[in-house]
Amino acid sequence: MTASDEMLARARARGDRALARLDVSPGATFDDVVRAVERAVGMRLTVVAETDTATWGTLTGFLLSFPDRREGSIHVRAADAPVYREFAASHELGHLLDDAHCCGAVHERSSVSPHTNPDLDTTQVEAELVAEHVAHAIARLIYASPRIAELSW
């Protein structure tokens, strides 16, 4: 097994542990998922669709946290399709659910991919892989029904 294979296996295992913290069933709405993450991490979350994103470049979303108030906000691009906004927000939810990354609390992190910033260390790359794993799993929960998936487009 290569080092990349080992990292991917760790990321999948961490992603699965993160998902186990969610109390949602297939067919849940995105709002249901956000509320479940709130319960899991003990903080109030707001998803904000931002209209002024000209300076964002390729950034699709980011998380702001206010640990002292147990509140956070996830910011996504309003110009993106709703299904893509939900996916970008789900990636940020993945970071919140990842105990190895957040240790059960919200911490400030950079939100860039290894393709954009080759200077990321292995821990940061792995955290991004975990968040992607969680985002894809959340999408499968939300769009579990072919009818729901078809209506999302």
Image (cartoon, rainbow, N blue to C red):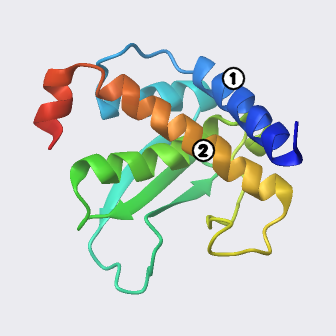
Q: Disc 1 to disc 2, how far (Cα)?
A: 12 Å
Quarter of the rendering containing residue 66: bottom right
> In this rendering, does residue 133 appear at all?
yes
Q: Position of residue 133 (x, y in %)?
A: 57, 38
Name the residue beneath numbered marker 1: 17
Depth order, front residue of 132/94: 132
> In this rendering, does residue 70 appear at all?
no
Name the residue beneath numbered marker 2: 131
Which residue is at 80% across, 75% downward? 119
Depth order, front residue of 15/32: 15
Horizontal side of residue 90 vs 94, given as left or right: left
Q: Position of residue 54 (x, y in %)?
A: 34, 85
Which residue is at 42% across, 61% downward? 75
User: Mark 2 falls on what kind of element?
Assistant: helix
Q: Earlier in the sequence, mark 1 or mark 2?
A: 1
Q: Position of residue 49 (x, y in %)?
A: 30, 61
Above or below, comparing residue 26 to residue 93 in the picture: above
Q: Of the residues shown, which amino acid type is indicated by label 2?
A: Ala
Q: Quadrant of the N terminus?
A: top right
Above or below, comparing residue 50 to residue 125 in the picture: below
Q: Quadrant of the C terminus?
A: top left
Tell me the tag on residue 128: none
Horizontal side of residue 139 vs 43, given as left or right: left
- Characterize the local packing of mark 2: few (<14), some (14-19) or many (20 or more) Cα atoms within 10 angstroms: many
Which residue is at 44% across, 81% downward? 57
Q: Of the residues shown, which amino acid type is indicated by label 1?
A: Arg
Q: Position of residue 32 (x, y in %)?
A: 35, 26
Horizontal side of residue 21 vs 34, given as left or right: right
Quarter of the rendering containing residue 2: top right
